[in-house]
Amino acid sequence: MTGKHANDGTRAEVTALRPFRRRLDRRAWPLRSIVFRPARTAAAIAAALVALTAAFGGAPASASTAHASSTVSWHALSLLNGWRSDQGQRNSGNPSWAVKGGVVYLSGSLHQPSGSRYEFTVLPPAARPADRTVVTVYTANGTSGYLDIGPDGQVSVYTMAPNTAQDARGYTSLAGVSFLAASTAVHPLSLLNSWQGVFAAPAYRLAGGIVHLDGSLHQSAPGSAEFAVLPAGARPARVLYLTVYTDGGPAVLMISPDGEMQAYQGKAWSFTSLTGVSFRTATTGAHKLNLRNGWQSGQPGYGTGDPVYTVAGGVVHLSGSLLQSAETSLEFAVLPRTARPRHNLWITTYTFGGAVGALLIKPSGVMEAFNHTGNAAQSYTSLAGIAYPLGS
């Protein structure tokens, strides 16, 4: 445990970081709207359990509203306010939801050809979080957007940059989005260095060798970027770099093999969301990806692990990092049939210097890494935290 701020140059990748030069979309939450309250109450958990029983105790969904993968059953989202599926244009799936093992998964894509409201659906009771939740998503032109999900199930999407509302409306991918259902039991994180919880208190869940983070936090007084330490059984094998939502645009979450967790860049101190982050533990097995087109593992330079995948409970989890010394092709690997999605998936990821990049994962298994603001993806791309259910 170093206890030092992530920008003090003690870690190789952090020394290369550059501050974001973006402002938060004006529609983002003002700081004054943040309400501090405890994590899930017993009453909320009991109510969610009743809702979960009701949602899955009735007749099964019809063929027109659900499709089944090997272990995950998908259900169609009912779209509102002029939002439409983008499946026909990009083969990226109809907007759908699923609940598996206490985790809510979203998938598919959408756009809004007309209208001005950002709310696009209301989730059923079984697929709602316990508290207000925000998760990053890929939007058109490689921009980073975010979902605002309320405990009442209302879901809206925005773009994390000024004057670019059409990016979210032009195309929003729900691929890779996940969060814990209100009824799911969690373990609280012990916060350090003046970090405090916002909405749902920061917590983690460990099941089947996979760790899921939950909640959000801010720092009440200037101090270290380190906010918590995960227990031994819930730590990754290598350093993880992930892009997360903050009050001032995308920022960085770093998780070390010793359990140290740091949040920095953007306005991480003002508000950082941990929701949607998942990763395999150090003892969970994985399979190496065979890299191609000059792509190489980032492990030797950054200690972030070789590019790997694992399938746990019907969900594919990626990890590791990669880079390309000479730009030749965006394609870096091909997944085996057992780990391929049903549709094209566009998912945001961390790239060199904290720039937001993206992965495209195709039904053929072809995987591509890119970003729209230079060659940051070739310089360094993290696969940490990327997960999607089979059938996505």
Image (tube, helix red, strand yellow):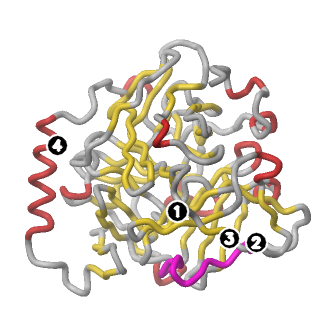
Q: Which residue is at a point 33% across and 75% down the rendered structure image?
A: 71
Most foreground residue, 113 or 378 = 378
* Outermost residue toward the right in this view: 326
Identity, as a three-letter code, of the amino acid under mark 4: Ile
- Residue at image coords 21%, 60%: 124
Mark seen at residue 291: 2
Local secondary structure at mark 3 = loop
Please state which amino acid type lies under the numbered disc 3. Answer: Leu
Q: Residue at x 26, y 57 (%)?
A: 127
Q: Are marks 2 and 4 in contact (CB under 8 Å)?
A: no
The residues tagged by marks 1 and 2 sit, at their Cα atoms, a distance apart of 17 Å
The residue pinned by badge 3 equals 289
Q: Quadrant of the C terminus?
A: bottom left
Q: Determine which quarter of the picture holds residue 331.
A: bottom right
- Disc number for residue 317: 1
How far apart are labels 1 and 3 at the CA level? Answer: 12 Å
Q: Position of residue 380 (x, y in %)?
A: 77, 53
Mark 2: which amino acid? Leu
| Contact? badges 3 and 2 (CB < 8 Å) | yes
In the rendered image, the vertical position of residue 205 relative to residue 175, given as above or below = above
Which is more N-terminal, label 3 or label 1?
3
Amino acid on which disc 1 is placed: His
Q: Is residue 89 left or right of residue 9?
A: left
Name above or below for residue 108 compared with residue 118: below
- Label 1 vs 4, first from the N-terminus: 4
For mark 4, what is the residue? 45
Q: Which region is colored magenta?
A: 330-343
